[in-house]
Image (cartoon, grey):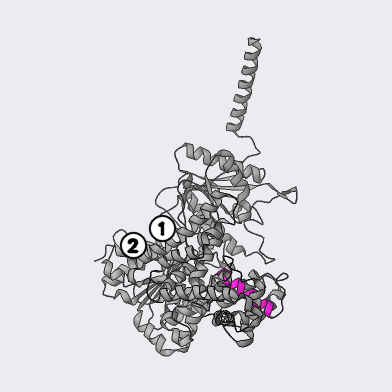
Amino acid sequence: MIDLSHLNPAQREAVLRTEGHLLVLAGAGSGKTRVIVHRIAHLIDQGVPASAILAVTFTNKAAGEMRARVEKLVPRKLARELTVGTFHAFGLELLRAEHARIGYPRQISIADTGDQLALVKRAMRLIRIDDRRFDARKILTLISLAKGAGRKPGESLRRPGEFAPFGEDYDLVAEAVFPHYEQALRAMAMVDFDDLIRIPTELLREHDDLRAALHDRFRHILVDEYQDTNRAQLELLKLLGLPKGNVCAVGDDDQAIYGFRGAEVRNILEFHLHFPGVAEVRLEQNYRSTGNILACANAVIRQNENRKPKTLFTRSGPGEKVRVVACVDEESEARYVASQIRESIARGRRPGDHAILYRTNLQSRPFEEALRAEGIAYEVVGGTEFFDRREVKDLLAYLRVLTNPADEVSLLRIVNYPPRGIGDATLEKIRHRATAHGLPLMDALRRAAEGEWEEVDQTAPRIRAFVELVDRYARRLAEGERASTLARELMAEVDLEGAVRSQFVSADAAAARVAILHETVRSLERYEAREGRRASLAQYLAQLALERREEEERELPGHRVILMTLHAAKGLEFPVVFLVGLEEDLLPHKGMQGAPPDLPEERRLCYVGITRARERLVITRAKTRMARGRAVQRPPSRFLADLPEEAIETIDLEEPTPESEERSRTFFSDLVAMLESRAAGK
């Protein structure tokens, strides 16, 4: 029997109610992961085969943590039979298993953001749209949102009356680009991130036998962070889970903050319409924050009308009051926060116990400067990720071509890198021939290498050397040699190190970038050691693509203060939190790209920020901020008016306090004494 005695009554109900659809409304810090883990263990304990349970998370880290915690409650062998992963990882496995139905090879490649942008720009050139006038990244965003909403090429991007975030001209361009973008992906046997949901959904909708097989396989489905699902994920879940009637969704509509990415809060609000007969359990006991922090969170979120009512409470006492501080300007705000952190560290806290949370990345600069002035180590979360660095992407492009020669984006990245005398003019002629003859680029390169086309005759020997290099390593990979060994040899043969070093004047900078190349290979080696005989280069590359797109949670250093946006902070907690910039047009934000403000989501963002704090919360605002060279008055955020007076302490840094007056008196008396002492000395 699984021990449930340490669960509170609501948590126990969520674990034991195993038949029928269930919506678990899990407030911030209410122990939802504990509930999911114990529910899985209880199902196995009741005789449900572990292989009949599908648990869906939103990050690979969450999936790994969930499996590890289940292993502590049931035998490891059973835990390993669970299907635990993200929506996108599940979709990729389904596509691989059913690749013949969609006409793809089993080793499907996943386009990363760089690949996608390259394909969008190519499509724009094809239909003669100026990529200097229209931003390819915005076009890609519109295509992604359309896919997430279940729309296909040739269809309108949005429903009548829906807001166009970049304007109607961008909508028209995106609608024109969409079909060519999709065609390019298919030609390269690639899928993008959104296809990992869209194509499995279409497969299940169109193939009764496949749908029936998955219904027989998965008797229980659990979905974590359900409030973050989009329309396409909802449709996939309905196709998987409706017939058996055992879908358990865990989430919190009050923490739905990803609307700008296509997540739809109405999926959780209308769960009962999609999954009839659902029972609801509310987890409201909070195990993270003090009573005063929760009082502020409850007061802010209560003002949202369209929500599932819940009130967080704690047994741990009220704690210290939430401090609400009005500062003179943004520099004053930053200095105040830095001085508070300095004092907190002096009292024994680690720098990593502190987080500064803001609405937009642009707000970080003054806080960085103030922390530097105080000599306090910090880290801004959200910089360039390891696998997005140029030298890493160059090496990965070589590896991707070995597994998928049809990957033209990667092929174009490496064909003349390091430089081997195959210039842009030559490549343009080969691409023209490829288009005219309907050839994949790699096949066109082979024909050019054989001297078939006189316009590139002089370059043929160099092209031949490149094609032979790729073929040789691809053959060795197919024969079973370790991918990490091949990666090291390939890196040495083409002298990637030398190419990297040539880009830097500083020897130290060059050495750091070369070390990054070697760390990439070590990452592949660790994967091979972990997976053993199951390891494959294609699987490693696909796993990388998933992890880079699925909002992976970072390991935060304990020796640095953390600066991050409210969106990045979701799911994290800190002993001390500074929630800064509580002003109108910042939080709530005035709206992006001309969009009207989404006040309910902004209120949810504020709620998420408040509930990141465990012991101490300081909320700050600036009375003025510099804009275009002049000081502009900043009205306080409307959310501050919701905070209960009994839970907060207000401070105005412009108004004298007893402490500041005492410091002034002491300063002046010390100054007088010093001057008198000097006079006496003369």
Would you call the spot at circle 1 few (<14 residues within 10 Å), some (14-19), or many (20 or more)?
many
**Disc 2: which residue:** 69
Q: Are marks 1 and 2 in contact (CB under 8 Å)?
A: no
State which mark lies toward you, 1 or 2: 2
Check disc 2 and give the amino acid type. Arg
Badge 2 element:
helix
Residue drawn at x 57%, y 32% is: 659
User: In this view of the protein, can residue 270 be seen by the observer?
Assistant: no
Magenta stretch holds residue 301: no
| Residue 59: percent from left, percent from top | 45, 66
Of labels 1 and 2, earlier in sequence is 2
Check disc 1 and give the amino acid type. Gln
Question: Would you place residue 114 above or below residue 314 in this image?
Answer: below
How far is the residue under mark 1 from the one under mark 2?
21 Å
Task: State the extent of the magenta-drawn residues as a range.
Answer: 110-126
Would you call the spot at circle 2 few (<14 residues within 10 Å), some (14-19), or many (20 or more)?
some
Number of marks in picture: 2
Question: Would you place residue 404 above or below residue 489 in this image?
Answer: below
**Disc 1: which residue:** 285
Which mark is on residue 438?
Answer: none
Using the image as rendered, state which of residue 660 and residue 36 is in the foreground.
Answer: 36
Magenta span: helix, strand or loop, mainly? helix
User: In this view of the protein, can residue 511 be seen by the observer?
Assistant: yes
Using the image as rendered, state which of residue 481 and residue 584 is in the foreground.
Answer: 481
| Residue 93: percent from left, percent from top | 42, 77
Image quadrant occupied by the N terminus: bottom left
